[in-house]
Image (cartoon, rainbow, N blue to C red):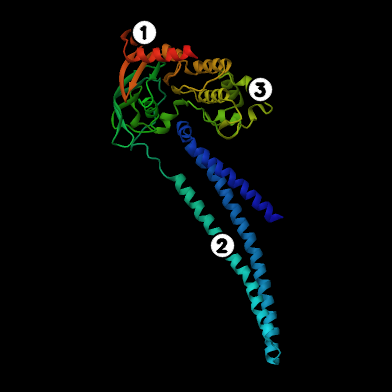
């Protein structure tokens, strides 16, 4: 019974450790954006060490049982050989007795094999645990340059200066991209799929390093500052909101570890999430399921917005959702986004007409180049690429 309980506990810990590892890898972008690498490594390390302890404990139990079995077996063999020896001396040992002796020896040898297997499994567990820790401790490709300094608290003045970028060092994705977003301004990125919108968004928190040009925040070259201090001032809301298999409270608190219940409740209200949360049986302690499957798309988006609000970033990167929502959910999400964007420099991959129209600057991208740049009215007056793109989106909306 004790061994069965130990094995059950071991499997539970293994399942939890596997889930944490899978979530960390699949949600890598959010983990990095919220500078939670050390937190996730520590979380997994704790579970892995618990798992290791359970494996060792089980091995000791099995080893002890096998050792006892071996001792009993050897005692039996000794007694049996004594009888066999006497039988040989007396001339009473038959072929049948000899055959039985061989069979007993094979039976008694089984505990030795079992003990050997347990030892091998134990060594495999040791090797697997060691390999996991090596993988988790590996340095990331993008790292601080020697002498990098912490980025002081910024106002949010962002500049791209003739930025070239390639993912593989061969095929160029961005070509001489330049634009400026003053503190508190909204810059909308528009253009067809593959134009470079997401790439620009990924370069701001230094998920990748550029090949040529410069990106600055309040005049600080972001390649020369500590990555953690840079990302701590950036908030990200993805097109498909990423939630962890945890409670609503824990998902919101991911934006600021150690946040008080009052802080969490306040940002939930600001994100229009408090109303639906309070209707749930467990309220903020409700488990959202893997990737938040127990919540609707609109509810997941509002949780992600609350998480970003809790971080209180100076720079906001927003990839607007294209998922269709009912009118009420759409209104609640849009209202929450407007609160989130208020007084923050926002780079938005825009899909909604209202967002595009109200942006301070619109960048029209095509094949990694900024082909048009200006306000909504300025670009419409040109009657070029933006005019056609905007008209196309407007026609799609009217046809719905």
Query: Circles 2 and 1: CB distance less than 8 Å?
Result: no
**Residue under pointer 1:** 377
Residue 135 seen in this snapshot:
yes
Q: What is the total number of numbered labels drawn onto the structure image? A: 3
The residue shown at (52%, 38%) is 23
- In which quadrant of the rendered image does the N terminus lie? bottom right
SS type, badge 1: helix
Sooner in the amino-acid sequence: mark 2 or mark 1: 2
In this rendered view, identify the residue nearer to me: 221 or 270: 270
The residue shown at (65%, 76%) is 103
Locate residue 371: give its quadrant: top left
Q: Nearer the viewer, mark 2 or mark 1?
A: 1
**Residue under pointer 2:** 119
Sooner in the amino-acid sequence: mark 3 or mark 2: 2
**Residue under pointer 3:** 278
Locate residue 361: give its quadrant: top left
Query: Circles 3 and 2: CB distance less than 8 Å?
Result: no
Residue 87 rendering spot, x and y as whole percentages: 70, 88
Label at residue 258:
none
SS type, badge 2: helix
6 left or right of 322 in image:
right
SS type, badge 3: helix
């Amino acid at each position: 019974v004790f061994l069965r309980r130990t094995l059950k506990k071991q499997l539970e810990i293994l399942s939890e450790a596997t889930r944490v590892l899978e979530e960390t890898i699949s949600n890598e972008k959010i983990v990095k954006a919220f500078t939670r690498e050390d937190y996730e490594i520590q979380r997994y390390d704790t579970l892995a060490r618990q798992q290791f302890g359970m494996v060792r404990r089980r091995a000791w139990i099995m080893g002890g049982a096998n050792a006892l079995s071996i001792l009993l077996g050897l005692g039996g063999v000794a007694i049996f050989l004594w009888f066999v020896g006497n039988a040989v001396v007396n001339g009473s040992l038959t072929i049948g007795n000899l055959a039985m002796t061989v069979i007993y020896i094979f039976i008694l040898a089984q505990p030795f094999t079992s003990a050997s297997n347990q030892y091998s499994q134990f060594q495999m567990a040791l090797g697997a645990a060691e390999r996991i820790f090596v993988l988790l401790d590996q340095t990331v490709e993008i790292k601080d340059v020697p002498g990098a300094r912490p980025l002081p608290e910024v106002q949010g003045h962002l500049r791209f200066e003739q930025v070239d970028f390639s993912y593989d060092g061969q095929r160029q994705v961005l070509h001489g991209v330049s634009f400026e977003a003053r503190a508190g301004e909204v810059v909308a990125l528009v253009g067809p799929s593959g134009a470079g919108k997401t790439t620009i968004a990924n370069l701001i928190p230094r998920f990748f390093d550029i090949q040529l040009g410069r990106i600055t925040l309040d005049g600080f070259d972001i390649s020369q500052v500590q990555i953690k201090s840079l990302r701590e001032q950036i908030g990200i809301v993805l097109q498909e909101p990423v939630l962890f298999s945890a409670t609503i409270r824990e998902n919101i608190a991911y934006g600021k570890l150690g946040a008080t219940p009052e802080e969490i409740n306040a940002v939930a209200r600001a994100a229009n999430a408090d109303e639906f949360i309070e209707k749930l049986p467990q309220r903020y302690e409700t488990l959202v399921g893997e990737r938040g499957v127990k919540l609707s798309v609109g509810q997941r988006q509002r949780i992600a917005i609350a998480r970003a609000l809790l971080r209180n970033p100076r720079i906001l990167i927003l990839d607007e959702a294209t998922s269709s929502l009912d009118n009420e959910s759409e209104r609640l999400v849009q209202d929450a986004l407007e609160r989130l964007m208020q007084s923050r420099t926002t780079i938005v991959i825009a899909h909604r007409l209202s967002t595009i129209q109200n942006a301070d600057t619109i960048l029209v991208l095509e094949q990694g180049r900024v082909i048009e740049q200006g306000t909504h009215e300025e670009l419409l007056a040109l009657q070029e690429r933006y005019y056609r793109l905007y008209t196309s989106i407007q026609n799609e909306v009217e046809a719905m």
